[in-house]
Image: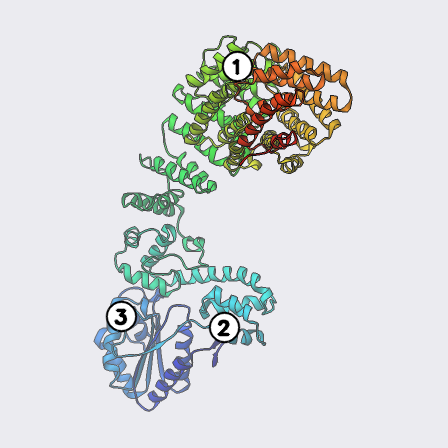
């Protein structure tokens, strides 16, 4: 090991031995040709300087030159530099002759650093000099990479990056004491063992008073990033301009871009692609030459610094266009387009949209947002622009839901051509599905009257949380109340649901709901509420079929907030029919399709309440209790979300025996429902829960009033399952076998199988054992088929035993 200046040469014993022997032999009149070969940063110059210093101490005439210097630009730069040190201007053979004559008088050492960067004329001259140097006391030593031999017949002096042991030696040298293996390993990892970056990194670590121990490795990483950035700048300045152009192309295009196309983009003229890649690899700036990319730790910003913004933009534009023409993967072309100027070419927007869809499918919505924003920079037709805004808002829903809502709201408020109507309806669906009712209402009240889709869009106002409590005369929406006769499918589903809630004219409601499904409505939300209306009329099969279609269409149209809402509604209907396993699967899909945390806080409780009710039906009370605890009262709003969640809690309190809680929660539901004039028991049977809890607490008088009123409203509505539920409530509170028999009769062909099983078990408890047996068996069969653990337990309590 030796030290020159501040540089300690380690793991260089073999190289130093060769150099020292050559200098000693020179003093006795012997010549040598030496090539110090290695990548940049491996200490090539330090080893060359060691040979020069030895020669100077031995009374040897030393002449030096270095490739890549500005002074050596142009043909024959090395020759001119060497001759200038002799105060001569000879060139070509004359210059060689002058050096040979000098060597005959005194030993000469010619040292050329970075010979891999010298011009072709100088390379040819050095090769000729090598042929004459062996005849006189002269040593010619050049620094190059292993891929470009300079001196024919020269002895190769290879240099490689330092190993772990060499790094450890340098740590000891710089800190005055050994460091631990973890610290040395971190240094080696960040520098690759190249002294050109290792020494500055060690100096910085010492200046920052870091201890050479493993605990310092995080700090080492931060310092290494700065050191590598500085090294990058120095290395780039030493390279020919064309090679730097190629480096910038590699930095911009990345490893997925074909290397031959990189050469085209770099516009190489005086240097081959292969040689340029060799120089970049030798400088430690790029990796594998067959698939080049920036070496780890090399910052893109440092590579592109000094490149005018317009040139960067032009490079991205040319790369994107060439990549598209040559079938480079679309994702790579899209990445290049991000920094390119608008092209105005027909392929750009379709490519960006397709890549954005792939990114969303790959759960990378942030990348999709970037591609869609870039697509909006292109000149496009109004419909395409509207579609892009919708696509962007949908992608943003996964990363910035509130921003997505605002974008959708602006889209609905902006004046657009009539041909954008379908896209605007989809935007309204997406905005409704996220659940920010306040924003939806503010937006719908300001939609311009000139828009052709205004009536369809603003129909959502009447189901936006508390909106229906207003009257057209006192409300802030300048629109008429939903018409009594509604033939527009985009109005029909909403109108049907409003009439369902009011519990009047079931047949008219049924016909209106079917208009929304059969036309069908372009507004998916209208179809969803049409399906709920049919379910409240016992048309469960048609409701599920309609929800199936909405789910499929919402998925096809990528309306990510509509899908979970539709799945949740289908789960509610399936649970009513006893299809509990599929209902649970729907709830699981709903929460995986769009995470609960991305839903608006006012809408989140609805999803959780639906999950609670499904789990209660399945007998999974522990899970229902767990779900209930996720939503403290202070985190729930005051609209339908709170009411539905409160109803689920009332049911949970009733089945777990917390009767006072059940009464309080059911009463809270009732107050809100009545304030909206929603009296139909088919929508939310809160009276049945209240009556059961009141009776169990001994308040039979109030319980009787509640269940009697429930029966009156159910009969006014006319749906068999709703009436049957009210009869069951009356039987439990008032008593009477007639109520139970009527409930069983009404449910004979009902799709709501669990309700029928409940009615059968209730009736079985008040009739003679002979009559009860077939009722219990039928109820048990339904319970087993539906996998309802609570009803199975009730049947077993009445004496039913499962057969083989």
Q: Are marks 1 and 3 in contact (CB under 8 Å)?
A: no
Mark 1 or mark 3: which comes first in sequence? 3
Drawn side of residue 67 relative to residue 577, left or right: left
Neighbourhood count class around disc 2 (C-alpha, 10 Å): few under 14, some 14–19, many 20 upward: many
- Residue 167 is marked as 2
Residue at x-position 33% and y-position 51%: 257
Q: Answer whether residue 307 is visible to the viewer in this image.
A: yes
Extreme-right residue of the structure: 698
Q: Tell me how far mark 2 sits from mark 3, CA to CA.
A: 36 Å
The percent coordinates of residue 625 (x first, y second) are: 66, 36
Drawn side of residue 374 relative to residue 177, left or right: left
The residue carrying mark 1 is 495
The residue carrying mark 3 is 122
Extreme-left residue of the structure: 93
- Tag 3 secondary structure: helix
Q: Nearer the viewer, mark 2 or mark 3?
A: 2
Q: Nearer the viewer, mark 1 or mark 3?
A: 1
Mark 2 or mark 1: which comes first in sequence? 2
When asked about the image quadrant of residue 781, the answer is top right
Drawn side of residue 520 relative to residue 796, left or right: left
């Amino acid at each position: 090991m030796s030290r020159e200046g501040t540089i300690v040469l380690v793991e260089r014993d073999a190289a130093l031995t060769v150099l020292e022997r050559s200098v000693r032999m020179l003093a006795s009149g012997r010549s040598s040709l030496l090539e110090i070969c290695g990548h940049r940063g491996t200490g090539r110059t330090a080893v060359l300087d060691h040979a020069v210093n030895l020669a100077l101490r031995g009374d040897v005439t030393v002449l030096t030159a270095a490739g890549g210097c500005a002074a050596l630009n142009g043909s024959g730069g090395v020759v001119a530099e060497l001759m200038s040190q002799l105060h001569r201007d000879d060139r070509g053979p004359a210059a060689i002759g002058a050096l040979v004559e000098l060597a005959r008088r005194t030993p000469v050492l010619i040292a050329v650093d970075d010979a891999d960067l010298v011009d072709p004329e100088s390379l040819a001259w050095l090769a000729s000099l090598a042929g004459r140097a062996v005849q006189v006391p002269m040593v010619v030593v050049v620094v190059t990479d292993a891929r470009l031999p300079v001196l024919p017949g020269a002895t190769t002096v290879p240099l490689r990056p330092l190993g772990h042991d060499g790094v450890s030696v340098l740590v000891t040298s710089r800190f005055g004491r050994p460091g631990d293996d973890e610290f040395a390993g971190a240094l080696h990892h960040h520098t690759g063992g190249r002294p050109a970056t290792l020494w500055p990194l060690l100096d910085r670590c010492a200046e920052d008073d870091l201890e050479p121990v493993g605990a310092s490795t995080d700090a080492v990483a931060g310092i290494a990033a700065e050191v590598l950035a500085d090294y990058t700048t120095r290395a780039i300045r030493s390279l020919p301009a064309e090679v730097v152009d190629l480096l910038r192309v590699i930095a911009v295009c990345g490893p997925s871009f074909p290397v031959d196309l990189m050469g085209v983009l770099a516009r190489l003229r005086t240097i081959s692609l292969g040689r340029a890649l060799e120089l970049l690899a030798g400088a430690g700036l790029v990796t594998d030459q067959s698939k080049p990319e920036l070496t780890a730790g090399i910052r893109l910003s440092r590579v592109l610094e000094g490149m005018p913004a317009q040139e960067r933009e032009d490079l991205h534009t040319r790369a994107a266009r060439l990549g598209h023409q040559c079938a480079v993967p679309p994702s790579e072309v899209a990445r290049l387009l991000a920094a390119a100027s608008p092209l105005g070419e027909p392929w750009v927007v379709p490519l960006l949209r397709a890549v954005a869809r792939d990114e969303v499918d790959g759960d990378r919505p942030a990348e999709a947002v970037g591609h869609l924003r870039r697509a909006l920079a292109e000149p496009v037709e109004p419909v395409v622009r509207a579609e892009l805004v919708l696509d962007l808002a949908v992608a943003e829903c996964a990363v910035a839901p509130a921003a997505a809502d605002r974008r959708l709201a602006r889209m609905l408020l902006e004046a657009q051509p009539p041909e954008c109507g379908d896209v605007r309806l989809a935007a309204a669906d997406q905005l409704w599905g996220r659940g920010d009712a306040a924003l939806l209402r503010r937006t719908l009240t300001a939609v311009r009257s000139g828009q052709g889709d205004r009536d369809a869009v603003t129909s959502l106002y009447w189901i936006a949380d508390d909106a229906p409590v207003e009257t057209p005369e006192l409300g802030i929406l300048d629109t008429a109340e939903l018409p009594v006769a509604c033939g527009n499918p985009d109005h029909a589903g909403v109108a049907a649901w409003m009439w369902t809630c009011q519990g009047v004219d079931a047949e008219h409601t049924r016909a209106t709901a079917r208009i929304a499904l059969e036309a069908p409505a372009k507004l998916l939300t209208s179809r969803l509420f049409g399906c709920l209306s049919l379910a409240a009329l016992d048309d469960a099969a048609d409701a599920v079929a309609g929800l199936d279609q909405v789910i499929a269409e919402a998925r096809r149209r990528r309306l990510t907030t509509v899908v979970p809402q539709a799945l949740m509604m289908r789960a509610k209907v399936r649970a009513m029919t006893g299809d509990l396993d599929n209902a649970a699967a729907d709830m699981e899909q709903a929460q995986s399709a769009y995470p609960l945390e991305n839903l608006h806080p006012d809408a989140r409780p609805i999803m959780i309440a639906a999950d609670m009710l499904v789990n209660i039906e399945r007998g999974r009370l522990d899970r229902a209790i767990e779900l209930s605890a996720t939503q403290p009262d202070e985190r729930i709003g005051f609209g339908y979300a709170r009411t539905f969640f409160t109803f689920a809690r009332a049911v949970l309190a009733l089945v777990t025996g917390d009767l006072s809680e059940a009464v309080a929660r059911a009463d809270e539901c009732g107050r809100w429902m009545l304030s909206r004039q929603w009296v139909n028991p088919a929508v939310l049977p809160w009276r049945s829960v209240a009556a059961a809890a009141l009776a169990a607490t001994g308040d039979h008088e109030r319980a009787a009033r509640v269940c009697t009123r429930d029966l009156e409203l159910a009969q006014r509505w006319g749906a068999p399952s709703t009436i049957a539920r009210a009869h069951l409530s009356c039987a439990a509170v008032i008593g009477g076998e007639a109520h139970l028999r009527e409930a069983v009769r009404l449910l004979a062909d009902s799709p709501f199988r669990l309700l029928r099983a409940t009615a059968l078990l209730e009736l079985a408890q008040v009739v003679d054992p002979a009559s009860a047996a077939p009722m219990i068996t039928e109820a048990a069969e339904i319970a087993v088929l539906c996998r309802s653990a609570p009803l199975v337990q009730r049947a077993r309590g009445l004496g039913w035993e499962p057969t083989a």
